[in-house]
Amino acid sequence: MWKRFSILIILILAGLTLNTVVHAYLPKADLIKGSGPEVYILENGTRHWIPSIEIFNEFNFKWQNIKVFSDLTIESYPQDDDWRKYDDHPDGSLLKGSGSEVYLIELGKKRWIPSPSVFINNNFGWKYILEIDDDDLDDYDLGDYVVFNETNRYPDTTILEGPEQGDILETGEIEFRYSGSNPMGPVSDLDFETYLKGHDDDWSYSSSNYIKEYDLSDESNRSYSFYVRAKNKEGYYDPTPAIINFQLGVSSYYQKVEIDDIEYDEDDFKDDNIVLSNESNEIIDITGWTIQVKGNSLDVVQAVRRLKAPFTDATNVNIRLNPDDELIISAGLSPIGVNFLTNKCTGYLDQDNFNPSLDTNCPYPNESDYSYLNESCRDFIDDLDRCELPNYINDSAISLDSECTSFLNENLNYSHCYSEHNQDPDFYNDEWRMFLNRTSNDVFSNVSDTIILYDQNGLKVDEYFYD
């Protein structure tokens, strides 16, 4: 039986050497925190948040035992359920009741530490002994007592294949292969649990399989930590799970915005164009994205949304694609000097100046607006197509009718259409136009190329190959 005074004497004599021996295979229950107020209990390489002072005190934890680490270190441990869900002390706890006996909690059982020399030789710390009620201590079944030289009971886990540490991947389909060593039996007795931080909510049981596959193509997270830990049939976990940190180089917008089409071999290279389309249900800002083509980067820049004359004085905004919106990027110069969002009136600006042509969905003038004009003028207007600028030079009946020509010049053009309809709920179309303003040197290869679309962080959004 231990005596309190002998413990104190041994503590004083051994105080300078307690930290010189480390047995990595022994379980460890540490209180840890980062720069924030959150305190965690660390058990078998997994942290659990202690959500209240009441729970902290309920387990008789000691404030002076809290170890402060960098936030990066804290975040390196996978986080499991809050400690409110647990009734027992964590594995690795040192407990005593009103008597002098000290116990190690392991696999839910209490293991008696029979002497101070056994305590010291196993690198236990005196300050970590927690005093609890005898009734609570009696709730634990009694296991084997701790011996002077504890043999290793804990398996070790090794990741055999998968991303390299710190890799930046360009595919969301990832496979890990792993194995372990088992000091208490054959490797075939090991089961494994995996946890992908940034994707999983909890450890996932994978039985004795040695492979874990993920498809992260639709993930919004870019940084991940993959953990795997072995467990032998006796119930001992690897207290230091194997870990691989990696980044998914695929954008969170991966294949939400797609390279929909490309015209790369037009008669005039300035008419070459590429089409991006938003295939998602989100509104996506693509300004600042780049298109990699033939070793060159083409930047997606701003454009004019409210296209009011004079166009070059209009305000540029970021190009935000609504669901099903398209951006057509042409190699040549903009016929009107700016990039822009098309609307129900922009067909008036086409006049064979754009490739591909602008949609001609301009509103027809109301018949009541020109009912006062003579019949030949009304017929002339009725024969016009949508967005057609009136050309009456060779029609003397119209050109000599000043009242008719005044109406035509004032009402059948982009400026008047914009003025009349820019507040319509359906005024804006689903198509943006952008121009690379190239006057020499072909942008797109006329033979074959792989074109890659990257987001503002340089992560792949889509890839398009043609030949």
Image (spheres, grey):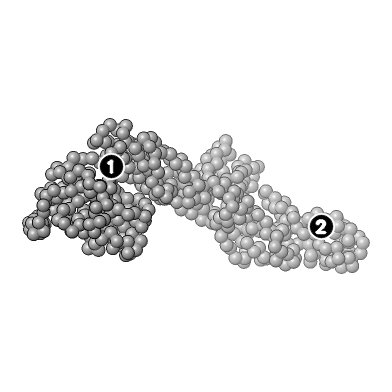
Query: Please, what is the three-letter code of the amino acid marked with disc 1?
Result: Tyr
Helix, strand or loop at mark 2: loop
Image disc number at residue 426: none
Helix, strand or loop at mark 1: loop
Query: Please, what is the three-letter code of the amino acid marked with disc 2?
Result: Asn
Q: Nearer the viewer, residue 10 or 467?
A: 10
Of circles 2 and 1, the one toward us is 1
Q: Residue at x 78, y 62 (%)?
A: 412
Q: Nearer the viewer, residue 324 or 191?
A: 191
Q: Nearer the viewer, residue 236 or 388?
A: 236
In the rendering, at what x and y percent does residue 97 appear?
20, 57
Rendered position, 427 above or below 262: below
Residue at image mark 1: 236
Residue at image mark 2: 391
In-image side of 95 versus 407 (left or right) = left
Q: Residue at x 25, y 61 (%)?
A: 60
In-image side of 270 versus 163 (left or right) = right
